[in-house]
Amino acid sequence: MPIKPTQATLHGYPRQGPNRELKKAVEGYWAGHITADELRATAAALRAATRQELRAAGIAEIPTGDFSLYDHVLDTAWMVGAVPKRHRGAAGTSLDTYFAMARGTAEAEPLEMTKWFNTNYHYLVPELSADTVFTADSRKPVEEFTEARQAGLNARPVLLGPISFLLLAKPAPGTDPGFAPLTLLDRLLPVYASVLADLRAAGAEWVQLDDPVLVQDQPGSVLGATARAYRELCAAAPRSDRPKLLVASYFDTLGEALPVLADSPVEGLALDFTGPAAANLDWLANIGGVRGKRLIAGVVDGRNVWAADLGHALGTLATLLGLAGSVDVAPSCSLLHVPLDVAAERDLDPQITRWLSFARQKTAEVTVLARALTGGRDAVAPQLAASRAARASRAGSALTRDPAVRARCAAVTASDARRPQPYPERAAAQRARLGLPPLPTTSIGSFPQTGELRQARAALRAGRISADAYRERIAEEIRTVIGCQEEAGLDVLVHGEPERNDMVQHFAERLSGFLATRHGWVQSYGTRYVRPPILAGDVSRTAPMTVEWTSFAQSLTDRPVKGMLTGPVTMLAWSFVRDDQPLADTARQVALALRDEVTDLEAAGTAVIQVDEPALRELLPLRRAAHPSYTRWATEAFRLTTGRVRADTQIHTHMCYAEFGEILSAIDDLDADVISLEAARSRMGIAAELAASGYPRAVGPGVYDIHSPRIPGVGELTALIEQALRALPSSRLWINPDCGLKTRTTDEVQAALRNMVTAARNVSGRLRDGA
Ligand code: GLN
Ligand code: ZN
């Protein structure tokens, strides 16, 4: 086969438009302000603008079908007809049924939502059962491909692959929970074959099937199913009646799945060669390459914000040229995970913006790389020089390297990250200091973020109110929150976090080393977009961040008020992190900065300090082989944050998002005196699991499901507490909600907390009476 010249391509692009037009249109449709046709027209215009932009940038083959009104996994469920019964009848038009799956209706719960691998994007979890009947609906992929064709573009439809679709799904509620969706593969393949045939009929030469689940450790049964799936999809139609198939993976190395795909009859592979996925290069070399196939080489990190090292990427591409039939250049994954354009960040120092690369810049990077391969390095000499200069400027900058921070990190010893006293000794000292009743009650930190608070913040930003007026507003809120908790009868109070816009952003704005963007929105789910901070340089704390409000809250009450910090792992997980040093080193810097805050809180008289780590599970590497080293540095960072306190200072931590199984030993290694966990929906399952693992310290399994507006009654709260007591001794049980209360209303919170305290007192009274 003649070697085809290298081209630049992408796996996907941000969907929202330059000013989040898609969010506005979708929410406008939900609110009844625009019609379905108007929504479709806005969506089509956004796609058209993206296509023109990519064409102008020099992208030779444009992805289609990556666009979505809500989520691409939901689109896939729709494409194969996996629409739950409860949504079918729930709404009028098919568009409303689609949104009912995403958001629920008064009668029907939505699909569950969960993290897309280890990114901060959330997808909707398809529901399947033994009764699921798949039917093909190829309209969306065909229409979006046809639009691009009619615009005269060379396009490649991108679909979620069948193995990932099935493995990302879960058994439908009310069906056998042991049901394995992969058993539906034989029913699903003909539906995929039919969509592929429709795309071929519309003129698609290539279709990309994304199967990122293959970068996780998969049993032989899944690898076998993968081999069979692609063999059958290739055999489903004569070659002329189907498009060429290209299987894409990203976020980590394919490992043992690589030979499986290499041996399959698919005509192309897209592989990630960045970060941990760089190991794909060795795997590819070891199997002698894929000379009969097209390779799309992901050599530009598609999910981080740093300008690529073009020289290094060219080196990788040079190696790859000898290992595949043809090589095209792309980012490692869809650019969905990065903001749109660095050029919009006019507040950032231009010295710094040239270190950064968002979707538009990454698009330019892959076109430069493609030109270097076809025209030689000289063809892009200025770009290569600029890339080198930007990297040198970044490496040499004082933001990137703060000698004091580095010296402090280097001096850390194992004993810095260990509390000197064993838990029983600490627990006794804390009992003596705090004098809490049995089954102590507390909350997780935030109180309702009312509209007035958000307006006050916006008014402060816009200069409509003074800093003093804003502070008085916060102080007033704290007075209310303390009053509410005293009235409900809680034992350990919180100040309610009214001054925090977001638990990560609040600290990122106060620590040096972090950058904030003005327009750096990325899709979190549906129409929710977030602006993650950029952890760009060495991290340190210049002044106390939380002491003032915590002390103010403490001055209002005799009961202990918890200090409240976001932990180092969560700070990393919900930021863009630097790519020029190991994550472990960055975590240690953040931990030392937070350690200073813990020290100051303690010195100010704070007896209970909570360090939230809701993201501990999320950062777990996709490959099991990398778990031990991750849990080692992650738990060390937490202990470094909290390890210097006195025995009688009580350290709490908090985690949410149900699945703890894989990190039980890491949770133990945090050595926190008290951990609060989400547990209400699983009926205390996690409390039982933790206790069964021999966890020796205090636990507060959440009894109040804060995700629902329902106010739990005293009876059901009592039952949950009693259930928790079957797993944990009363001396180690705390009573608290599942998570922070910021999304609830003040009335709901007041009533629910009152009921929670009543239930706790009822149960502890019965324990005292020996009942
Ligand atoms: N302290 C935070 C709050 O109460 C914790 C939030 C979280 O776990 N995500 O809002
Ligand atoms: Zn939580």
Image: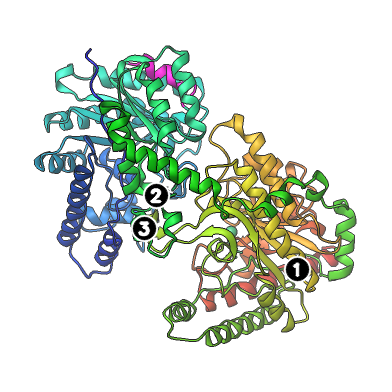
Residue type, mark 3 in image: Arg
Q: Residues within 10 Å of mark 1 (few under 14, many from 20)?
A: some
Residue at 64% in and 45% down: 585
Asked whether, in this view, residue 114 is left or right of residue 93, the answer is: right
Residue type, mark 1 in image: Asp
Q: Is mark 1 within 8 Å of ligand 1?
A: no
From the viewer's perspective, is the residue at label 1 or at label 3 nearer?
A: 1
* Spatial separation of the CA atoms under disc 1 and disc 2: 36 Å
Q: Quadrant of residue 145?
A: top left
Q: Is residue 664 in view?
A: no
Using the image as rendered, state which of residue 397 and residue 203 is in the foreground. Answer: 397
Q: Which residue is mark 1?
A: 600
Using the image as rendered, state which of residue 406 and residue 175 is in the foreground. Answer: 406
Residue at 42% in and 33% down: 311
Q: Quadrant of residue 142?
A: top left
Residue type, mark 2 in image: Val
Q: Earlier in the sequence, mark 1 or mark 3?
A: 3
Q: Position of residue 7 (x, y in %)?
A: 25, 30
Q: Position of residue 473 (x, y in %)?
A: 55, 85
Which element type, helix, strand or loop, lies under badge 3? helix
Region in magenta: 254-264
Q: Earlier in the sequence, mark 1 or mark 2?
A: 2
Which element type, helix, strand or loop, lies under badge 1? helix
Q: Residues within 10 Å of mark 2 (few under 14, many from 20)?
A: many
Q: Which mark is residue 338?
A: 2
Q: Main secondary structure of the magenta part?
A: helix
Q: Which residue is mark 3?
A: 103
Using the image as rendered, state which of residue 296 and residue 126 is in the foreground. Answer: 296
